[in-house]
Amino acid sequence: GQQLNQSPQSMFIQEGEDVSMNCTSSSIFNTWLWYKQDPGEGPVLLIALYKAGELTSNGRLTAQFGITRKDSFLNISASIPSDVGIYFCAARGVGSSNTGKLIFGQGTTLQVKP
Amino acid sequence: NAGVTQTPKFRVLKTGQSMTLLCAQDMNHEYMYWYRQDPGMGLRLIHYSVGEGTTAKGEVPDGYNVSRLKKQNFLLGLESAAPSQTSVYFCASSDNEQFFGPGTRLTVL
């Protein structure tokens, strides 16, 4: 079945550093989403991407929908302590357009040292 | 506008007990989902619904049942809880992007 490979699994960085994480798959998708989950909370949508090649920013966050439609990356610039959490990529394939179902990556755990 | 709400927030059950988790959304979304989240396993889809009165199985449906009698509510039932069902359960609703509730932490002893 369809699967997303998210890397890295975890990162421990210094405050002020930039962060990059990505998701890859052997399948093609129509939508890529990036979520952040704070401890004890539900995932919160950060960025949604709908077109191959699309580059979208949300404050210090930037994400891109890969031109092959098989991958996406998320960058965080100038990290701050509140960036700590688990970041998930999610994707929707053509076959799921009438159900809205998403496939999720395993998550990247980010820790920021002040 | 509360978004997606879940009740209860925490619950401890004994093996064999039953319970129902309630999810409510006020965004008039057609699609609703139940996930479980376990360490190292990410989010796994249990059941989902594409509209009032409809339900379908997801990736890990065994041991769970669901009902969508009203568009705004999606119920997840455990008829006979097992320790393997200890997890954090998330509900989500969607029109295009999925929005998640705060979660229910369930422990089965």
Image (cartoon, rainbow, N blue to C red):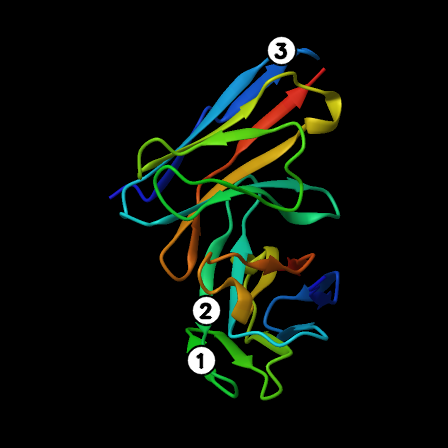
- Secondary element under disc 2, as helix, strand or loop, is strand
Name which residue lies at 42% across and 40% down: B54
The amino acid type found where label 3 is placed reads Gln
Which quadrant, please, contains the C terminus of chain B? top right
Name which residue lies at 52% across and 56% down: A101
Instruction: Kindly identify which chain the residue marked by label 2 belongs to.
Output: A
Query: Residue A47's spot in the image, x, y percent?
Result: 46, 69
The amino acid type found where label 2 is placed reads Ile
Q: CA distance from mark 1 to mark 3?
A: 47 Å
Query: Residue B15's spot in the image, x, y percent?
Result: 70, 13
Name which residue lies at 44% across and 61% down: A98
Instruction: Kindly identify which chain the residue marked by label 3 belongs to.
Output: B
Asked if both marks, 2 and 1, belong to the same chain, the answer given is yes
Name which residue lies at 75% across and 48% down: B40
Other-residue count near label 1 (Cα within 10 Å), few / some / many at <14 / 14–19 / ≥20 = some
Task: Please name whichever residue, A13 or B60, is drawn nearer the observer in this view of the structure.
Answer: B60
Mark number displayed over residue A56: 1
In the displayed structure, would residue A15 be above or below residue B81?
below
Q: Circle 3 is placed at which residue position? A: B17
Query: Residue B51's spot in the image, x, y percent?
Result: 36, 45
Frontmost of labels 1 and 3 is: 3
Q: Circle 2 is placed at which residue position? A: A47
The amino acid type found where label 1 is placed reads Thr
